[in-house]
Image: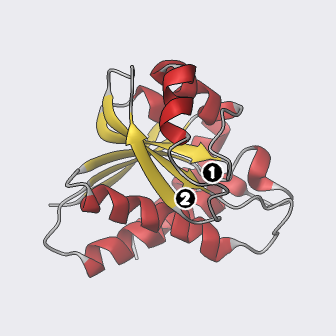
Amino acid sequence: MSNLKLIHGSCADQTADAVVNAANSGLWEGGGICGVIFSKCGPKELAQECSNYQTPIKDGNAVITSACKMKNAKYIIHAVGPDFRQTPKAFLELFNAYYNSLVLLKDNNLHSISFPLISSGIFAGNLPNPAEESAKQCCRAYKKFIQDYPEYDIDVLLCAFTSAEYNAAKTIFNNIENK
């Protein structure tokens, strides 16, 4: 049976088949969770894996690499969330970053995934509550995935790094989950 859970912590610290990197379109090492994931995987090793893809990757798309030196995951799914500073109404692209990551998980016969709150950091732009919006789109993508693939079980962790993000995400998460 599939499961979606919100936790307070870093997605890079969770044990899962795949950890999601909130990637930039060039798949290069960035700041925030992207930098943490590159560090845990081995920056040179993960950069080499990422170089196998033709970039830029479009907003909402996702690609997969091995987790290199990371011990708690087998794979990294690089989900390119929209940059709301450039595209302030890119909610579909944010939804797609989550949904396409789940499909990529299934396509690789994997069953557990650990997400950050995609596009809630530097890419949040002027969103009034980026953690809420990201949690909302994650919940929507999860519900669509289990509707589209009812026989494929997945365990999804949505990870809010700060207390403020967790509290904001929890509000929307609980409202959506109870509907």
Q: Is residue 87 left or right of residue 167?
A: right
Whole-percent x, y for residue 85 in the image: 86, 59
Q: Going 76% across and 58% down the picture, which residue do you hit?
A: 83
Residue 141: % across, % down = 44, 70
The residue tagged 2 is: 135
Q: Residues within 10 Å of mark 2 (few under 14, many from 20)?
A: many
Q: Quadrant of residue 72?
A: top left
On the question of residue 162 being in view, the answer is: no
Q: Give the answer, above or below, for where 129 lies relative to 49.
A: below
State whether residue 108 is above or below residue 147.
above
Q: Relative to residue 33, is residue 69 depicted above or below? A: above
Check disc 2 and give the amino acid type. Answer: Ala
Per the model, the C-alpha gap separating discs 1 and 2 is: 9 Å
Q: Position of residue 87 (x, y in %)?
A: 81, 69
Earlier in the chain: of badge 1 and badge 2, it is 2
Name the one closer to the observer, 132 or 71.
Answer: 71
Secondary structure at numbered mark 2 = helix
